[in-house]
Image (cartoon, rainbow, N blue to C red):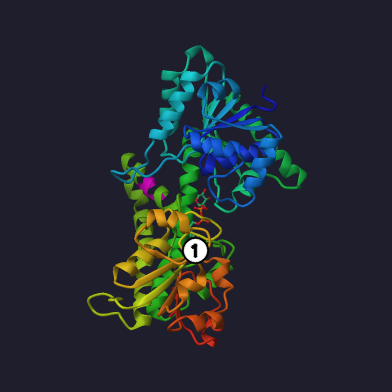
Amino acid sequence: GAKRPRLTFLGTGYLGATYAICFAEMGYRVIGFDVDVDKIARLANGTLPFHEPGLENLLRRNLAAGRLQFSTNLAQIAEFGDVHFICVGTPQRADGMGADLSYVEAAVTGLSQNLTRKALIVGKSTVPVGTVEWVEQLVSKNAPADLGIEVAWSPEFLQEGFAVDDVLRPNRIVIGVKTEWAKDMLHATHKGVLDLAAAEGRTVPLMVTDFATAELVKVAANAFLATKISFINAMAEVCEVAGGDVVQLAQAIGYDPRIGNRFLQAGVGFGGGCLPKDIRAFQARAQELGVGDALRFLHEVDLINLRCRPRVMRLAAELLGRSGPAGPDLSGTRIAVLGATFKPNSDDVRDAPALAVAALLAKSGSDVRVYDPQGMENARVVQPKLTYAPTLNDAVRSADLVCVLTEWAEFRESDPYVLGTLVASRRVVDGRNCLDSARWMKAGWQYRGMGRS
Ligand code: UDX
């Protein structure tokens, strides 16, 4: 019934697994589905295939409580679910900038062919605007017509490292629907979230929109965040030549509540599985729609972001006295790269600026040693040619330069005096402006930050 709908989540990657587990935690009966037999077996055994604080505990607790199951059987989830969430990946297409929707197509088609009763299919994956209509067509082609299957869209806004709270305590819920029935169904689906908020004295805005708006909200939010980061990185470029300090600049403009102080940290730029690919897919879609001009600035946002990487290399070459007119020659130098993941408290190295910079430094001839508290395993897959050090101390030992490229607490809290005794030469590039520069300089280090001349 509509009171406590039974939920399925198709695609148990980062997004689907997190949602499945958190909705079970709110008391819903849930099945997570995936075509990956191994992944489903691991989840059913209480093991997360990725790192997310607090989530594995919830997984085990809800498996034990019998509210949460995992399955590779489409017929089973089709029979079980009142609401089916599509949470499969939408990677960047190999042949261009747009999104690859083949996983969405496979999930929707497979589910539709197995449905035996009325249900709501809700898209959560990040998709180009206009995808919902295409999903509706897929459903009507593949599901028995008399069931009256409906489709809706409800974007997610998960940040890695905060995903549990982002599901249980979102700052908004957006649902794109066409009918009252779909709206009521999604209201019932989010009752757990609304009840939790009420119990904690908060309110969560629930916005009901049309399809296109719901699809656009997600990419618009990510485009704005990417723009904010590139804005401050552009200011860092100016500070570097004008002699300013971008950290103070960000603080000063951030006191204006219209601007706000968050997402204004200059550094090696944004990476991860969302921002870089989403701004590219958004531009591609706008071009298809004939409004490419409206999003041309996102191309510039992308370029500013990518320019951060060679800027780190230039700072490194300057500190090492190796910045020749034909570009830096780092041969014969040893550099410790601290950080591989795209941000701290994550093991995700997708589009990670840190790894890209490490590769640039190695390509210019330096003997690079990479260390990351949690990202080494994934980094080895993406950049197998780099050299990895098992510990922070091993990475910095005998280094001519230390480059901090992900702002892990382990690096921020490391003792510059102790590290100073290990290195060959006390030079540090702070690619995230995360170190206490005064303390490092007091310990005898030559310090360079991003946008701090
Ligand atoms: C992002 C969005 O925040 C989230 O709402 C969306 O659902 C998915 O994409 P996530 O990719 O987990 O989440 O990471 P986020 O914390 O947003 O950071 C993205 C990148 O921007 C990281 O590489 C981070 O280092 C960088 N960043 C962030 C900066 O360089 N400066 C900042 O001030 C903030």
How many numbered marks does the figure carry?
A: 1
Q: Residue furthest top?
A: 146
Magenta stretch contains residue 333: no
Magenta stretch contains residue 280: yes
Task: Give the extent of the magenta segment.
Answer: 279-283
Crowding near pointer 1: few (<14 within 10 Å), some, many (20+)?
many
Query: Of residues 23 and 38, which is closer to you in this image?
Result: 38
Q: Is residue 136 visible?
A: no
Q: Is residue 242 left or right of residue 56?
A: left
Query: Of residues 124 and 20, which is closer to you in this image?
Result: 20
At x 42%, y 81%, the residue is 243
Q: Quadrant of the C terminus?
A: bottom left
Q: Main secondary structure of the magenta part?
A: helix
Name the spot of residue 259 as percent of width and height, x first.
54, 62
The residue wearing badge 1 is 372
Label 1: element kind: loop
27 vs 57: above or below = above
